[in-house]
Image (cartoon, helix red, strand yellow):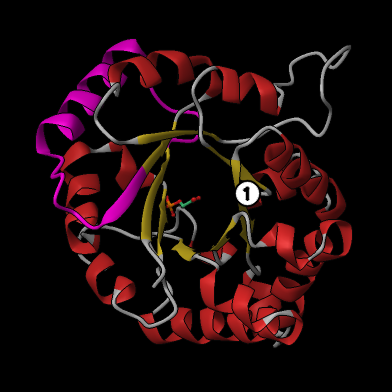
Amino acid sequence: MRKTLIAGNWKMNGSNDSIAELLSGIRSQINSAWNCDILVCPPSIYVAQVVNQLAESGVNVGGQNVSDQDSGAFTGETSANMLKDAGCTYVLVGHSERRSLYGESSHTVAQKFEKALASGLKPILCIGETLEERENGTTMTVVNGQIDAVIDHLGIEKLAQGVIAYEPVWAIGTGVTASPDQAQEVHAAIRAHLAQSNSDVAQKTQILYGGSMNASNADQLLTQADIDGGLIGGASLKANDFIAICTAAG
Ligand code: PGA
């Protein structure tokens, strides 16, 4: 049985005050009986204080990005060891904003995945097609290619140590969510693709859905057979919305 993971990606949002408010809202409503893992990914400068403020809450903290290098003259970068040292347990790699705005190739993303694993972090590999690619009928070529870059670099067993997040680019931050059927179709196809290399890995790999998931559509998405959780942007910035999604999952 795959456990559900609800992950909040705060992106470049927040301040000391707004984060304190968000976390106290989350802490006060969290239910230890929920059968799901919960994760928040703050901007890296806030990671340490979020770890502090979430102490003993059971909520995991993750990075939004990680360097493909270990240490040294890489101005502005944050290494996997630093995230781990600050208390992170997860890190996002290859979010579509990193790929499209900062030119991250699938090979670079695979290197980041490798660094995360080597430091004991669980990488969440973000993949997804653009609207144009969907309309061209190349969704699975794109998505499988993004997964294969990691398999080619590290092997399927290493991929299995991370999490996959399917996030159609056209659904991110747009308010347009993939329908439960559309999402399930891609998730099942991803699992079938993994099964071609290793059926055990295919069965145990968590595949999250991301892209305008919110309090009102979470339930329908999360009850699909191959959707094992959510990666939530906008709705993770409001405690009540995020808690409503966790409730649907739990
Ligand atoms: P969204 O973002 O929920 O605001 O669409 C999801 C993401 O980018 O991870």
Quarter in which the N terminus is drawn: bottom left
Q: In this view, does 61 lie to the left or right of 37?
A: right
Is 144 or 12 nearer to us in this picture?
144
Q: Is residue 157 left or right of residue 203?
A: right
Seen in the picture, residue 53 relative to 219 is either above or below; the reply is above
Magenta-highlighted residues: 10-38
* Ligand 1 within 8 Å, label 1 CB: yes
Total count of labels? 1
Seen in the picture, residue 227 relative to 247 is either above or below; the reply is below
Seen in the picture, residue 207 relative to 103 is either above or below; the reply is below
Q: Where is residue 209 in the image (x, y as percent from the top left)?
A: 46, 65
Residue 227 in magenta stretch: no
Based on the displayed image, in which of its 4 quarters is residue 118 positioned?
top right
Residue 26 in magenta stretch: yes
Label 1 sits on residue: 95
Seen in the picture, residue 34 relative to 130 is either above or below; the reply is above
Q: Position of residue 186 (x, y in %)?
A: 55, 81
Q: Look at 76% across and 37% down and name the residue there.
A: 115
Q: Is residue 237 left or right of residue 211?
A: left
Q: Look at 69% across and 38% down and name the residue there.
A: 116
Q: Look at 84% across and 45% down and name the residue there.
A: 108
Secondary structure of residue under mark 1 = loop
Q: Position of residue 126 (x, y in %)?
A: 61, 56
Quarter in which the C terminus is drawn: bottom left
Circle 1 crowding by C-alpha within 10 Å: few under 14, some 14–19, many from 20: many
Residue type at tag 1: His
Based on the displayed image, in which of its 4 quarters is residue 212 positioned?
bottom left
Is 169 or 94 nearer to us in this picture?
94
Q: Look at 38% across and 23% down and name the residue there.
A: 14
